[in-house]
Image: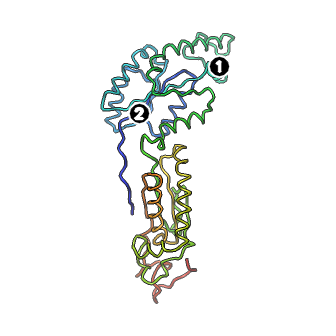
Amino acid sequence: MTMRSEPVESRPEVVVVTGVSGAGKSTVVNALEDLGYFCVDNVPTPVLPNTLAALGDAGVKKVGFGIDVRVRGFLNDATRVLGEIEAVDGRDVTVVFVDASDEAILRRFSSTRRPHPLSTSADPGSERSATAVLDGVRTERELLTPLRSRSTFVIDTTQLSVHELRRKVIERFGPGSGKRLRMHTRVMSFGFKFGTPLDADLVLDVRFLKNPHFVPGLRELSGLDAAVKNFVLDAEESQQFLKLTADLLEFTLPRFEREGRSYLTVAVGCTGGRHRSVTLAVELAERVRSRLSLEVEVVHRDVDRVKLSGPGADPDHAPPDKTVLPRGEPR
């Protein structure tokens, strides 16, 4: 059984990553791919409109392009083409310019021993290599001046590690950026007797609470019925559990978002997944929605899984008649 709020519609979006060689463009493109963008690196600007049209026909709404001096003569037309793209279909075009100091770029090229795309030296290990890299960087900066002036924002990576740069990209384009869909959170009720959910990120055990199964008139109901809900929520321990758990999620979920998580599953378990976990999953989801304005899906994995009476009835949940005897200790 699943209850879900409606997703938020997003506009077609294009992120163009450009900047100086050695500043970290590849890291930015890779981070965008991890966030669900369809990325194409080193793409000639004249083919951008047709590429976007083809991706749009395929239903792709989040696209990332890497554009730099490797596209050679095509770079001159870049700003005009981006303007045309932005005017089509209301596309949201963001240009990210990645930069770093000459010293940092020289140090990075020296450590990787790769030649700069505009380097005048064929041997990265030669004495002319450092001068050649700096000459290439200066030429590159001149060629990229129109794109830098067109950029939405600039990231200076001089003092950033790869991980810090990736975090900046996630903060700007990830699910917690406030510009696009938030992290999808799922609260799942389940029964421990049927196994812990394999996709659970957080598992909460509520078997310490009094079990409605042993209360006359509640056994055959579920945690979605008012009588069971009242029984569970009237307990002081239930209210304490909800308060402390909601506080925990209010603290942790935004931090999961910050790390680029697109979805997260919180599993709430009781013995059979029919009474306590069902009620508390619904209540917990409502508190998360109200506190964090997140999209929350509620899933009751095992609420209809237990057979309560008749042939094949579950001995842990069947009524205490002469046919099926209860076993085990109270839960």
**Residue 115 coordinates in the image, percent (x, y):** 60, 17
- Horizontal relation, residue 271 to residue 150: left or right: right
Task: Say if mark 1 contacts mark 2, CB within 8 Å.
Answer: no
Where's residue 70, x and y in %? 49, 18
Query: Which residue shows up at 45% across the image and 87% down it?
Result: 323
Give how far apart the Cα atoms at labels 1 and 2 are: 32 Å
- Residue appearing at x 47%, y 43% in the figure: 175
Q: Earlier in the sequence, mark 1 or mark 2?
A: 2
Q: Residue at x 50, y 78 (%)?
A: 316
Helix, strand or loop at label 2? It is strand
Q: Is residue 290 above or below residue 103?
A: below
For the N terminus, the quadrant is: bottom left
Neighbour tally class for label 1: few under 14, some 14-19, many 20 plus, Cα within 10 Å: few
| Disc 1 target residue | 103
Specify the amino acid type for callout 2. Val
Name the residue type under label 1. Answer: Glu
Give the farthest residue toward the bottom.
Answer: 322
Q: Secondary structure at mark 1?
A: helix
What residue is shown at x 37% (from left), y 37% (from top)?
61
Q: Which residue is mark 2?
A: 63
